[in-house]
Amino acid sequence: MMNRNLRMTHQREIILEELHRGKIHPTADELYERIKKKLPRISLATVYRNLEILSEAGVIKKLEISGRQKRFDWDPHDHDHVFCTQCQRVDNIPTPDAPVPYVAPTQEKGYRITGCRIEFFGLCPKCRKQQETTKKTGEHDMACTTCEPASLSDAQRQVLEALAQSAEACGSKELAASTGLETKQISCQITALKNKGYVSSPARCKYEITDQGKGALG
């Protein structure tokens, strides 16, 4: 499935090796943290760029789950995914052996349908167990503490509020200007907020608040 014109550089080999090693679905940021242990001089932008190139070449698969940061799958073959709405875990689901759902000509609105993508979501086994335990003890549902507004630091709240007030995706420098925080601080807060599902990255180095992030602001 790989484009024969794609040059397999050392950086790409390491990226593929780390992506395949865990057989999970990491974000570019998560993968970067693992790769820089082997390639200390590599930048996050380089990891982003190579992941995009590898996915476009069909070597890996890019997962664009609604309202969440892009993730990458080492297996490019057809299959669906299920994600946990609490801890953001993503797992594979075998694609049913069935044709693309029928769409009547009157429903196509001029489109030529070439495929479809199905999103499954729910609670993973770990979050289900935590939730069931909490219900049994009669405590407040703490199965996912990162989903609660109280888990936001002052700096994280500032970043979310700035994103909520912006009509379009913002870069780190724009956020630094509107919050008064340093650029390095912004980068750290963005990483933490993306891990919580409060911020997504529709384009490289651009960020926007998710519905979950708006809910965290209250």
Image (spheres, rainbow, N blue to C red):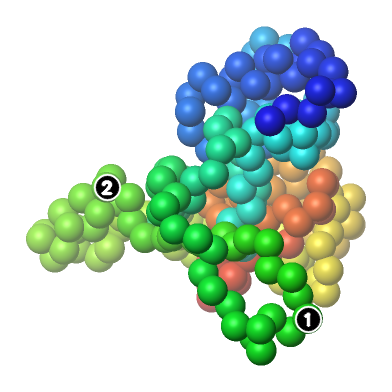
Q: Residues within 10 Å of mark 1 (few under 14, many from 20)?
A: few
- Please state which of the two labelled residues, at mark 1 or mark 2, is closer to the viewer: 1
Quarter residue 1 falls in? top right
Q: Is residue 57 above or below residue 21?
A: below
Pointer 1 and pointer 2: residues touching (CB < 8 Å)?
no
> Would residue 129 be found to the left or right of residue 162 on screen?
left
Q: Secondary structure at mark 1?
A: loop
> Would residue 164 be found to the left or right of residue 81 on screen?
right
Quarter residue 211 falls in? bottom right
Q: Residue lying furthest bottom in this view?
A: 106
Residue at image point 81% right, 23% down: 4
Residue at image point 76% right, 56% down: 202
> Would residue 206 be found to the left or right of residue 197 on screen?
right
Quarter residue 77 falls in? top right
**How many angstroms separate mark 1 from mark 2 (CA)?**
42 Å
Disc number placed over residue 125 in the picture, else none = 2
Give the number of marks: 2
Residue at image point 58% right, 25% down: 19
- The amino acid type found where label 2 is placed reads Pro
Q: Where residue 71 sits in the image (x, y, percent)?
A: 61, 43
Q: Secondary structure at mark 2?
A: helix
- The amino acid type found where label 1 is placed reads Gly
Q: Where residue 196 sits in the image (x, y, percent)?
A: 53, 52
**Residue tagged by mark 1?**
110
Residue at image point 54% right, 74% down: 102
> Would residue 34 be found to the left or right of residue 47 on screen?
left
Q: Is residue 36 above or below residue 172?
A: above
Disc number placed over residue 33 in the picture, else none = none
Q: Earlier in the sequence, mark 1 or mark 2?
A: 1
